[in-house]
Image (cartoon, grey):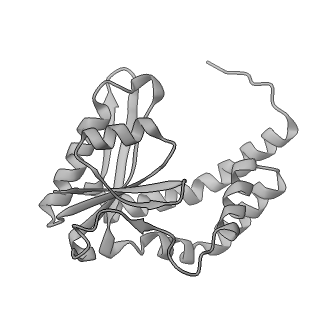
Amino acid sequence: MFIVYALQIVSILNYHIINHLYGVVVSFYLEYMKDYSELFVVAGDEEKGIVGFCMGYYMDKDDQMQNFLHNNRIKVIWKTMLLMLAGNKPTWNKVLARFKHRPSVSDWVIVNDKCEQMLNNQRGDLLSVCVLPDCRGKGYAQDMMEKFLAAMKERGRRLCLLSVKTNNLRARRYYERNGFELYRKRGGEGLTYMKLL
């Protein structure tokens, strides 16, 4: 089955550039899954196939992204420039945000310090819980998050952190229902939640 879209020339350019960038993204996830397979949980449906995933990292091993970007910096810079030249708005927004927000001191405000004494080798971070829109509310996110948190606990982690945009009320309610407490705030744009394991 073919789906036909009415595309503008910029969209066609973005499509081809994103396909090239896809290889870099696939490389990152393959490397990530090799190193942290227990922290990459996938939800599947017999009819729809993969309907969601959940991933994170150990706080004392959070240099993987920096290492990947360092080892692939030429590819990433080149492909980012191509996307910008093609007028890809999300890419422009990300690049501009990197330059716009450079505080000299942390602008996070801790509102709950009961876990401040925990070292990074006791902490983990939940990066993403993603479920296809038409599959939400069916328990996929819950199952994935439970498996993710169990894997962290099995490996000696005592605390899980996660960040969420302040305006993402659905996600905030979901995390609060699952025992996450507010840990810190960043102005009106971001929150970090925590949960003891």
Above or below 117: residue 138: above
> Can residue 156 be seen at all in this image of the molecule?
yes
Which residue: 26% across, 73% down? 116
Of residue 158 and residue 73, the one placed in the foreground of this image is 158
Q: Is residue 169 above or below residue 98?
A: above
Where is residue 172 drawn, in percent x and y? 38, 42
Q: Nearer the viewer, residue 86 or 173?
A: 173
The N terminus is located in which quarter?
top right
Quarter holding residue 4:
top right
* The quarter of the displayed image where residue 38 is located: bottom left
Tell me the quarter of the image containing the C terminus. Answer: bottom left
Residue 130 in view: no
Vertical order, 3 against 188 (above or below): above
Identify the residue shown where x is 42% and y is 75%. Answer: 63
Residue 132 position by quadrant? top left
Q: Residue furthest right?
A: 9
Q: Residue furthest front?
A: 111
Instruction: Determine whether, in the image, residue 84 is placed left or right of residue 163.
Output: right
Vertical side of 40 occupied by 176: above or below: above
Total marks shown come to 0
Residue at 78%, 57% (x, y): give it.
Answer: 84
Image location (x, y in percent) of residue 33? 36, 58
Where residue 19 appears, as percent x and y from the top left, is: 66, 48
Seen from this angle, which residue lies furthest bottom?
A: 104
| Residue 108 appears left or right of 160 | right
- Between 16 and 106, the one nearer to me in the picture: 106
Q: Residue at left 50%, top 75%?
A: 106
